[in-house]
Amino acid sequence: MKRKMLLVSLAILLIASVSLFANGSSESSDTYVIGVPQPLTGTNAQPGACALNAVKVAAKQFNDAGGILGKTVEIISYDDQGSPEESVRVAQRLVSDGVDAIIGSCISSAVLSAGQIYENNQIPTFGTGTSPTWMAQGWEYLFRACQNNDFALPLVVDKLTELGVERVAIFAGQDDAAVAGVNTFTELANQAGITVTTTEYYVEGNTDFSGQVARIINSNAQVVFISTFGPTQPLIARQLRQFGFNGLCFTKDIYQVDALQVAGAASNGIAFAYPYLTYASIDDCKDPFIKQFLEAYYEMFGELPVSDCAYRAYDSMLVLKAAVEAAGTTEKTAVAEAVNTLSGVQTLAGMQDFTYGDREGLHSFNIFVIDNEQYITFDEWVGSPLYNEIVSQY
Amino acid sequence: MLFQVIVSGFVIGCVYGLIALGYSLIYKASGLMNFAQGDVLTLGCFLGYTFYTLLGLPYWLSLIITAAIAFFFGMGEERFIIRKLQNKNVLTVYVVLATISIQYILQNSIQAIWGPNMLSYPRVFPWNNVTIFGVNIQTESVFCIIMSFILMMLLQVFMNHTKFGTAMRASALDAKAAKACGINPSFATGVTWGIAAALAATAGILLGPIYGVFIMLGQTIGRKGFAAAIMGGYGNVIGAIVGGVLLGLIETMSAAYWSSTYKDMIAYGLLLIFLYVKPTGIFNEKALNR
């Protein structure tokens, strides 16, 4: 009995201490509290951790410069595990913590499940996923300062049409962003008269895709559209090349630098439409604004962000700060209304413009290609030996 | 194309087989299931990466050190967690649940030590591919297949033709009788858990150069290794590898020639069929009744 009492007391103590630390000083009016729900464990821990780090970088920069409207920025972060169920629990907790704004999650299905809670509580939220689905809900307090894949995929299909591609195979995961990518791409391809020869799915956690690759190659596709995220990208790149597919591949969003390092030469001929790149070293970056961010990130964490989710979160912070300053108050509804008036906000992805009325800040993207294990723009790639080798097939 | 698909099925099947070997050994020794096997594979992959890539040790030495560390990890797991629970006479299901806890603790610990980033292994062999029957196959994949069969044979010899192997089997069958014969059953069981962990870690270091190094590498493989162990005959050494290869081939072939969407459904459906129709597996291994 004594032991039971002891265990119960310990559990209560633990919960109480966690709540105490979590609530922190959010009650104080001198602080502007930003909730950061991100996946910090599991398959998507890497992008989640990078996003959280980037938020911390931005918060430090803001605070060093006097805060937001004189208020000190504080961060409350929880692990949503990238799962819809957990993200709802995390959202409820952040609401009870009394946060002023939300940056996250980088997993679209988590944004989709938690979005209604933030909307009901009128908390300005910047989702950091790239799926179109959660923005399609019409939530007025939900914004995005990173890529919407639905905006970038037309660029990809236009490029395929321009190259004379007739047959594309799709390899995809089964999460919300991956499936949304498949649906949009298929629709656009059909409209452009490009045949989708096969659509192959994989289950999260699998590492061997030889069956899918065999079907893709047997379908006689000229190009593979890869709708995945995270560690699957280099695996599928390697296996496609191993099986002898040497054609162009388009990924639905960025093919990160860590994927490039893992897959090496198998990454050559992989392209994507995206606003920015990730880097293995600061010196590789030529964009002064991104370089500045990378230096600040490196100074704080001793490493560079391998996931672009860091960029997404950092940009969201910049836009949020601009909105609060434009509103002249931290009052949530005023901030949300101010976001819709913003344009010309300098971010890592370029100038953000929210005046289109779709609560999205980005509307134009670049197409990058990997050649000789280096990122270059598609325009730079045209005429190279690999370009000639691949494009001559079409 | 068919040959390449078969080789891929063999590679992943051999890895399932190595994990299944661990499941089978532990079941034989303790009548338990250790669901942390898949994450020990991940641990092995990260340890191998550390020794081979970060410390610059030769691959074979990294493999041996990794297996040795995993061996002691497995022994420690049995000695300090599993046996402590068993000494309390808790239900077997609680002990199995403890292995699930270990699984998550391992996952989080690996992330805490190595971080969440995906890491890349440099090439192990100087040549990228070997050509077999006109088909290019990654050298590390061939090495993985060869190593799996060598390990299975070594284990078979160790268990059936060495004094300690016999002692381990005796301890598993009847601990009291084994003790009366001068065998230390506790030590023998600990060694079995150690060998199981070493096998999983070896699978991890074999997989690293093929798939890269990331936290969730062993999660699905661990589950499928369990399914493979049942198909082969839960507790049977040869059955584990045969079950693994069979599962690898079936899921790869079904994905290639039927549907990739239902690849896992087919794999686990097959497990259900075995449980219903032939629970003793291909090698007719009878379940322990403790």
Image: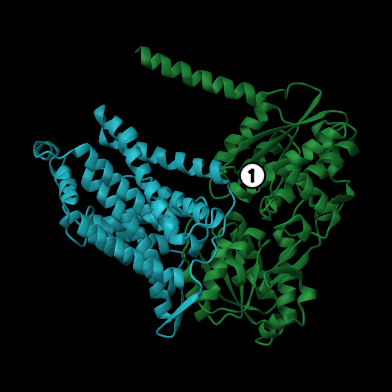
- Among the chains pictured, the one given green colouring is A
Kindly state the secondary structure of the residue where label 1 is placed. Answer: helix
Picture coordinates of residue A22, whole percent (x, y): 64, 26
Where is B192 relative to A250, above or below? Answer: above
Q: Nearer the viewer, residue A299 or A269?
A: A299
Name the residue at 78% across, 44% down: A296
Where is A24 relative to A259, above or below? Answer: above
Picture coordinates of residue B144, whole percent (x, y): 39, 66
Where is A366 relative to A1, above or below? Answer: below
Amino acid carrying label 1: it is: Ala
Q: Residue furthest bottom?
A: A392
Q: Residue under circle 1? A: A49
Picture coordinates of residue B138, whole percent (x, y): 47, 73
Q: What chain letter is assigned to the residue under label 1?
A: A
Picture coordinates of residue A102, whole percent (x, y): 72, 38
Q: Nearer the viewer, residue A84 or B94?
A: B94
- Among the chains pictured, the one given cyan colouring is B
Name the residue at 26% across, 36% down: B92
